Amino acid sequence: MENIVEIIITAVIVGILGTAVGYYIRKNIAEAKIAAAEDAAKKILDDAGRSAEAKKKEALVEAKEEMHKLRTELDREIKERRNELQRLERRLVQKEENLDRKIDSLEKKEEILSRKEADVDKSQEKINELYTKQLAELERLSGLTSEDARNLLLANVQEEIKHETAIMIKDLEQQAKEEADKKAREIISLAIQRCAADHVAETTVSVVALPNDEMKGRIIGREGRNIRTLETLTGIDLIIDDTPEAVILSGFDPVRREVARIALEKLITDGRIHPARIEEMVEKAQKEVEQKIKEAGEQATFETGVHGLHPEVIKLLGRLKYRTS
Protein backbone atom coordinates (compact mmCIF):
# COMPACT_ATOMS: atom_id res chain seq x y z
CA MET A 1 0.00 0.00 0.00
CA GLU A 2 2.78 2.35 0.87
CA ASN A 3 4.56 1.49 -2.37
CA ILE A 4 1.49 2.41 -4.35
CA VAL A 5 1.24 5.76 -2.58
CA GLU A 6 4.88 6.40 -3.24
CA ILE A 7 4.47 5.51 -6.87
CA ILE A 8 1.48 7.82 -7.16
CA ILE A 9 3.33 10.59 -5.42
CA THR A 10 6.33 10.00 -7.56
CA ALA A 11 4.16 10.04 -10.66
CA VAL A 12 2.51 13.25 -9.58
CA ILE A 13 5.87 14.82 -8.84
CA VAL A 14 7.20 13.64 -12.20
CA GLY A 15 4.11 14.98 -13.95
CA ILE A 16 4.47 18.28 -12.17
CA LEU A 17 8.15 18.42 -13.03
CA GLY A 18 7.40 17.42 -16.67
CA THR A 19 4.76 20.07 -16.90
CA ALA A 20 7.12 22.66 -15.49
CA VAL A 21 9.93 21.59 -17.77
CA GLY A 22 7.58 21.57 -20.79
CA TYR A 23 6.28 24.99 -19.87
CA TYR A 24 9.83 26.24 -19.51
CA ILE A 25 10.86 24.73 -22.83
CA ARG A 26 7.77 26.11 -24.61
CA LYS A 27 8.43 29.46 -23.04
CA ASN A 28 12.01 29.46 -24.25
CA ILE A 29 10.90 28.40 -27.73
CA ALA A 30 8.20 31.09 -27.78
CA GLU A 31 10.67 33.68 -26.60
CA ALA A 32 13.12 32.55 -29.25
CA LYS A 33 10.41 32.75 -31.94
CA ILE A 34 9.37 36.17 -30.64
CA ALA A 35 12.96 37.35 -30.72
CA ALA A 36 13.40 35.95 -34.24
CA ALA A 37 10.16 37.58 -35.31
CA GLU A 38 11.26 40.83 -33.75
CA ASP A 39 14.62 40.56 -35.54
CA ALA A 40 12.85 39.78 -38.84
CA ALA A 41 10.44 42.65 -38.31
CA LYS A 42 13.32 44.93 -37.45
CA LYS A 43 15.18 43.78 -40.57
CA ILE A 44 12.09 44.29 -42.69
CA LEU A 45 11.64 47.74 -41.21
CA ASP A 46 15.29 48.53 -41.85
CA ASP A 47 15.02 47.28 -45.43
CA ALA A 48 11.78 49.22 -45.92
CA GLY A 49 13.43 52.31 -44.53
CA ARG A 50 16.44 51.93 -46.81
CA SER A 51 14.17 51.23 -49.83
CA ALA A 52 11.98 54.17 -48.95
CA GLU A 53 15.07 56.33 -48.55
CA ALA A 54 16.39 55.16 -51.94
CA LYS A 55 13.02 55.75 -53.59
CA LYS A 56 12.84 59.09 -51.89
CA LYS A 57 16.27 60.02 -53.21
CA GLU A 58 15.34 58.69 -56.67
CA ALA A 59 12.08 60.64 -56.61
CA LEU A 60 13.98 63.74 -55.54
CA VAL A 61 16.49 63.23 -58.39
CA GLU A 62 13.67 62.74 -60.90
CA ALA A 63 11.84 65.76 -59.52
CA LYS A 64 15.03 67.82 -59.78
CA GLU A 65 15.58 66.62 -63.36
CA GLU A 66 11.97 67.38 -64.27
CA MET A 67 12.27 70.80 -62.68
CA HIS A 68 15.51 71.40 -64.56
CA LYS A 69 13.86 70.28 -67.81
CA LEU A 70 10.81 72.46 -67.19
CA ARG A 71 13.05 75.38 -66.26
CA THR A 72 15.09 74.87 -69.45
CA GLU A 73 11.96 74.72 -71.61
CA LEU A 74 10.52 77.71 -69.83
CA ASP A 75 13.76 79.64 -70.35
CA ARG A 76 13.81 78.67 -74.02
CA GLU A 77 10.16 79.66 -74.47
CA ILE A 78 10.77 82.91 -72.62
CA LYS A 79 13.78 83.56 -74.83
CA GLU A 80 11.77 82.85 -77.98
CA ARG A 81 8.94 85.06 -76.78
CA ARG A 82 11.44 87.78 -75.93
CA ASN A 83 13.03 87.49 -79.39
CA GLU A 84 9.60 87.57 -81.03
CA LEU A 85 8.64 90.61 -78.98
CA GLN A 86 11.90 92.26 -79.97
CA ARG A 87 11.20 91.54 -83.65
CA LEU A 88 7.69 92.88 -83.32
CA GLU A 89 9.01 95.91 -81.52
CA ARG A 90 11.55 96.54 -84.28
CA ARG A 91 8.84 96.16 -86.91
CA LEU A 92 6.58 98.54 -85.03
CA VAL A 93 9.42 101.02 -84.72
CA GLN A 94 10.12 100.73 -88.46
CA LYS A 95 6.42 101.17 -89.26
CA GLU A 96 6.27 104.19 -86.98
CA GLU A 97 9.32 105.64 -88.69
CA ASN A 98 7.80 104.96 -92.12
CA LEU A 99 4.51 106.51 -91.02
CA ASP A 100 6.35 109.53 -89.68
CA ARG A 101 8.20 109.92 -92.95
CA LYS A 102 4.97 109.52 -94.93
CA ILE A 103 3.21 112.02 -92.68
CA ASP A 104 6.07 114.47 -93.15
CA SER A 105 5.95 113.90 -96.90
CA LEU A 106 2.17 114.36 -96.96
CA GLU A 107 2.43 117.51 -94.91
CA LYS A 108 5.04 118.88 -97.29
CA LYS A 109 2.90 117.94 -100.28
CA GLU A 110 -0.10 119.52 -98.61
CA GLU A 111 1.84 122.71 -98.07
CA ILE A 112 3.00 122.68 -101.69
CA LEU A 113 -0.58 122.04 -102.88
CA SER A 114 -1.85 124.85 -100.68
CA ARG A 115 0.69 127.23 -102.14
CA LYS A 116 -0.12 126.07 -105.66
CA GLU A 117 -3.84 126.42 -104.96
CA ALA A 118 -3.27 129.94 -103.72
CA ASP A 119 -1.19 130.70 -106.82
CA VAL A 120 -3.94 129.22 -109.03
CA ASP A 121 -6.57 131.35 -107.30
CA LYS A 122 -4.46 134.43 -107.81
CA SER A 123 -3.86 133.50 -111.45
CA GLN A 124 -7.60 132.86 -111.95
CA GLU A 125 -8.39 136.28 -110.49
CA LYS A 126 -5.86 137.88 -112.81
CA ILE A 127 -7.31 135.97 -115.79
CA ASN A 128 -10.84 137.04 -114.89
CA GLU A 129 -9.73 140.65 -114.57
CA LEU A 130 -7.85 140.43 -117.86
CA TYR A 131 -10.84 138.79 -119.57
CA THR A 132 -13.17 141.52 -118.33
CA LYS A 133 -10.80 144.21 -119.54
CA GLN A 134 -10.33 142.56 -122.94
CA LEU A 135 -14.07 142.05 -123.33
CA ALA A 136 -14.72 145.71 -122.53
CA GLU A 137 -11.96 146.79 -124.91
CA LEU A 138 -13.33 144.48 -127.64
CA GLU A 139 -16.84 145.91 -127.21
CA ARG A 140 -15.43 149.42 -127.34
CA LEU A 141 -13.41 148.76 -130.52
CA SER A 142 -16.07 146.72 -132.38
CA GLY A 143 -19.03 148.80 -131.33
CA LEU A 144 -20.94 145.56 -130.50
CA THR A 145 -22.26 144.38 -127.22
CA SER A 146 -21.56 140.87 -125.97
CA GLU A 147 -25.10 139.82 -126.99
CA ASP A 148 -24.58 141.08 -130.56
CA ALA A 149 -21.18 139.37 -130.75
CA ARG A 150 -22.71 136.10 -129.56
CA ASN A 151 -25.48 136.26 -132.17
CA LEU A 152 -22.95 137.00 -134.91
CA LEU A 153 -20.79 134.07 -133.76
CA LEU A 154 -23.77 131.71 -133.71
CA ALA A 155 -24.72 132.74 -137.24
CA ASN A 156 -21.18 132.01 -138.49
CA VAL A 157 -21.12 128.67 -136.71
CA GLN A 158 -24.49 127.72 -138.16
CA GLU A 159 -23.28 128.52 -141.66
CA GLU A 160 -20.13 126.44 -141.15
CA ILE A 161 -22.19 123.52 -139.79
CA LYS A 162 -24.44 123.59 -142.86
CA HIS A 163 -21.39 123.49 -145.13
CA GLU A 164 -19.73 120.65 -143.21
CA THR A 165 -23.05 118.74 -143.12
CA ALA A 166 -23.36 118.97 -146.89
CA ILE A 167 -19.80 117.69 -147.31
CA MET A 168 -20.49 114.84 -144.85
CA ILE A 169 -23.67 113.83 -146.67
CA LYS A 170 -21.79 113.74 -149.96
CA ASP A 171 -19.04 111.60 -148.44
CA LEU A 172 -21.61 109.23 -146.95
CA GLU A 173 -23.35 108.87 -150.29
CA GLN A 174 -20.02 108.07 -151.98
CA GLN A 175 -19.13 105.61 -149.23
CA ALA A 176 -22.55 103.92 -149.47
CA LYS A 177 -22.13 103.60 -153.24
CA GLU A 178 -18.68 102.05 -152.89
CA GLU A 179 -19.96 99.71 -150.15
CA ALA A 180 -22.89 98.67 -152.34
CA ASP A 181 -20.52 97.87 -155.24
CA LYS A 182 -18.29 95.86 -152.92
CA LYS A 183 -21.25 93.97 -151.48
CA ALA A 184 -22.57 93.21 -154.96
CA ARG A 185 -19.21 91.82 -156.02
CA GLU A 186 -19.10 89.63 -152.91
CA ILE A 187 -22.61 88.29 -153.61
CA ILE A 188 -21.70 87.48 -157.23
CA SER A 189 -18.42 85.80 -156.12
CA LEU A 190 -20.26 83.76 -153.52
CA ALA A 191 -22.84 82.67 -156.08
CA ILE A 192 -20.07 81.60 -158.48
CA GLN A 193 -18.29 79.67 -155.72
CA ARG A 194 -21.46 77.86 -154.71
CA CYS A 195 -22.23 76.90 -158.25
CA ALA A 196 -18.70 75.55 -158.71
CA ALA A 197 -18.66 73.60 -155.42
CA ASP A 198 -19.41 70.25 -157.02
CA HIS A 199 -16.70 70.64 -159.64
CA VAL A 200 -14.14 71.70 -157.02
CA ALA A 201 -15.00 68.74 -154.83
CA GLU A 202 -14.58 66.39 -157.79
CA THR A 203 -11.21 67.81 -158.84
CA THR A 204 -9.62 68.20 -155.39
CA VAL A 205 -10.25 64.72 -153.95
CA SER A 206 -9.26 61.17 -154.90
CA VAL A 207 -10.81 57.96 -153.65
CA VAL A 208 -8.71 54.87 -152.89
CA ALA A 209 -10.57 51.57 -152.62
CA LEU A 210 -9.78 49.26 -149.71
CA PRO A 211 -10.06 45.47 -149.61
CA ASN A 212 -11.92 45.68 -146.27
CA ASP A 213 -12.72 48.13 -143.47
CA GLU A 214 -10.06 46.59 -141.20
CA MET A 215 -7.46 48.19 -143.46
CA LYS A 216 -8.58 51.63 -142.16
CA GLY A 217 -7.21 50.85 -138.71
CA ARG A 218 -3.87 49.72 -140.18
CA ILE A 219 -3.65 52.91 -142.24
CA ILE A 220 -4.30 55.03 -139.12
CA GLY A 221 -1.74 53.04 -137.10
CA ARG A 222 -1.03 53.08 -133.39
CA GLU A 223 -1.95 56.50 -131.97
CA GLY A 224 -2.33 57.74 -135.58
CA ARG A 225 1.38 57.63 -136.41
CA ASN A 226 0.93 55.99 -139.86
CA ILE A 227 -1.63 58.50 -141.13
CA ARG A 228 0.39 61.43 -139.72
CA THR A 229 3.53 60.17 -141.49
CA LEU A 230 1.70 59.79 -144.80
CA GLU A 231 0.08 63.24 -144.54
CA THR A 232 3.41 64.88 -143.58
CA LEU A 233 5.35 63.28 -146.45
CA THR A 234 2.75 63.94 -149.15
CA GLY A 235 1.10 67.16 -147.90
CA ILE A 236 -2.32 65.61 -148.55
CA ASP A 237 -5.15 65.13 -146.02
CA LEU A 238 -6.46 61.58 -145.56
CA ILE A 239 -10.15 61.44 -144.70
CA ILE A 240 -11.16 58.14 -143.11
CA ASP A 241 -14.87 58.29 -142.37
CA ASP A 242 -17.87 55.99 -142.58
CA THR A 243 -17.48 55.48 -146.33
CA PRO A 244 -17.34 51.69 -146.71
CA GLU A 245 -14.05 50.23 -147.97
CA ALA A 246 -12.68 53.59 -149.16
CA VAL A 247 -10.27 56.36 -148.12
CA ILE A 248 -10.58 59.91 -149.46
CA LEU A 249 -7.46 61.94 -150.34
CA SER A 250 -8.05 65.70 -150.22
CA GLY A 251 -5.69 68.40 -151.52
CA PHE A 252 -5.46 71.22 -154.06
CA ASP A 253 -2.11 70.05 -155.50
CA PRO A 254 -3.01 67.33 -158.06
CA VAL A 255 0.56 66.04 -158.33
CA ARG A 256 0.90 65.57 -154.55
CA ARG A 257 -2.54 63.94 -154.49
CA GLU A 258 -1.47 61.50 -157.22
CA VAL A 259 1.72 60.67 -155.28
CA ALA A 260 -0.34 60.00 -152.16
CA ARG A 261 -2.79 57.80 -154.11
CA ILE A 262 -0.08 55.67 -155.69
CA ALA A 263 1.82 55.34 -152.39
CA LEU A 264 -1.31 54.32 -150.51
CA GLU A 265 -2.28 51.76 -153.14
CA LYS A 266 1.24 50.27 -152.98
CA LEU A 267 1.05 50.10 -149.18
CA ILE A 268 -2.37 48.39 -149.31
CA THR A 269 -1.06 45.85 -151.83
CA ASP A 270 2.13 45.25 -149.84
CA GLY A 271 0.29 44.96 -146.51
CA ARG A 272 3.24 46.22 -144.44
CA ILE A 273 2.21 49.65 -143.19
CA HIS A 274 4.59 51.45 -140.83
CA PRO A 275 6.44 54.82 -140.95
CA ALA A 276 9.63 53.47 -142.54
CA ARG A 277 7.70 51.56 -145.20
CA ILE A 278 5.47 54.59 -145.82
CA GLU A 279 8.53 56.78 -146.46
CA GLU A 280 9.91 54.21 -148.90
CA MET A 281 6.62 53.91 -150.80
CA VAL A 282 6.15 57.69 -151.00
CA GLU A 283 9.63 58.03 -152.50
CA LYS A 284 8.85 55.34 -155.10
CA ALA A 285 5.52 57.00 -155.89
CA GLN A 286 7.23 60.38 -156.42
CA LYS A 287 9.69 58.84 -158.87
CA GLU A 288 6.83 57.09 -160.69
CA VAL A 289 4.78 60.31 -160.96
CA GLU A 290 7.83 62.23 -162.18
CA GLN A 291 8.36 59.59 -164.86
CA LYS A 292 4.69 59.82 -165.90
CA ILE A 293 4.96 63.62 -166.09
CA LYS A 294 8.06 63.35 -168.28
CA GLU A 295 6.41 60.80 -170.57
CA ALA A 296 3.25 62.94 -170.86
CA GLY A 297 5.34 66.01 -171.78
CA GLU A 298 7.30 64.09 -174.42
CA GLN A 299 4.06 62.66 -175.83
CA ALA A 300 2.61 66.18 -176.08
CA THR A 301 5.67 67.53 -177.93
CA PHE A 302 5.61 64.52 -180.25
CA GLU A 303 1.94 64.95 -181.10
CA THR A 304 2.34 68.70 -181.76
CA GLY A 305 5.57 68.29 -183.72
CA VAL A 306 7.51 70.64 -181.43
CA HIS A 307 11.08 69.49 -180.78
CA GLY A 308 14.21 70.80 -179.06
CA LEU A 309 12.44 72.06 -175.93
CA HIS A 310 14.23 72.38 -172.58
CA PRO A 311 13.63 69.40 -170.23
CA GLU A 312 12.05 71.67 -167.63
CA VAL A 313 9.57 72.97 -170.21
CA ILE A 314 8.74 69.39 -171.15
CA LYS A 315 8.19 68.64 -167.46
CA LEU A 316 5.86 71.62 -167.15
CA LEU A 317 3.87 70.39 -170.14
CA GLY A 318 3.62 66.96 -168.53
CA ARG A 319 2.29 68.44 -165.27
CA LEU A 320 -0.68 69.78 -167.25
CA LYS A 321 -1.93 66.18 -167.35
CA TYR A 322 -2.97 66.60 -163.70
CA ARG A 323 -4.46 70.08 -164.06
CA THR A 324 -7.85 70.76 -162.47
CA SER A 325 -8.85 73.85 -164.52
Image (cartoon, rainbow, N blue to C red):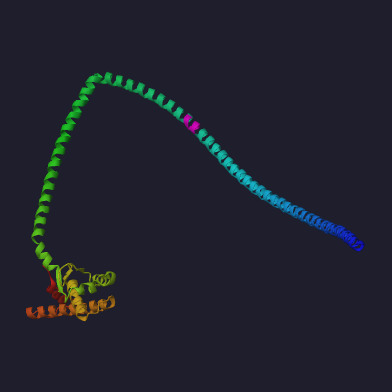
Residue 134: image location, x then y, percent: 32, 22
Q: The N terminus lies in which quarter of the figure?
A: bottom right
Picture residue at 20% right of the left edge, 23% below the top: 151
Q: The C terminus lies in which quarter of the figure?
A: bottom left
Residue 223: image location, x then y, percent: 28, 69
Of residues 37 and 84, the one nearer the viewer is: 37
Residue 68: image location, x then y, percent: 69, 49
Report which quarter residue 82 is drawn in.
top right
Report which quarter residue 130 is drawn in.
top left
Measured along the vertical axis of the image, is residue 6 above or below residue 57? Answer: below
| Helix, strand or loop: magenta stretch | helix
Of residues 283 and 111, the one nearer the viewer is: 283
Magenta residues? 106-110
Residue 69: image location, x then y, percent: 66, 50
**Left of 130 or right of it: where is 267?**
left
Whether residue 297 appears in magenta in the rendering, the answer is: no
Measured along the vertical axis of the image, is residue 44 above or below residue 169? Answer: below
Of residues 84 and 300, the one nearer the viewer is: 84
Of residues 283 and 185, the one nearer the viewer is: 283
**Left of 118 or right of it: where is 286?**
left
| Count of labels in the image | 0
Q: Residue furthest front?
A: 1
Measured along the vertical axis of the image, is residue 52 above or below residue 139? Answer: below
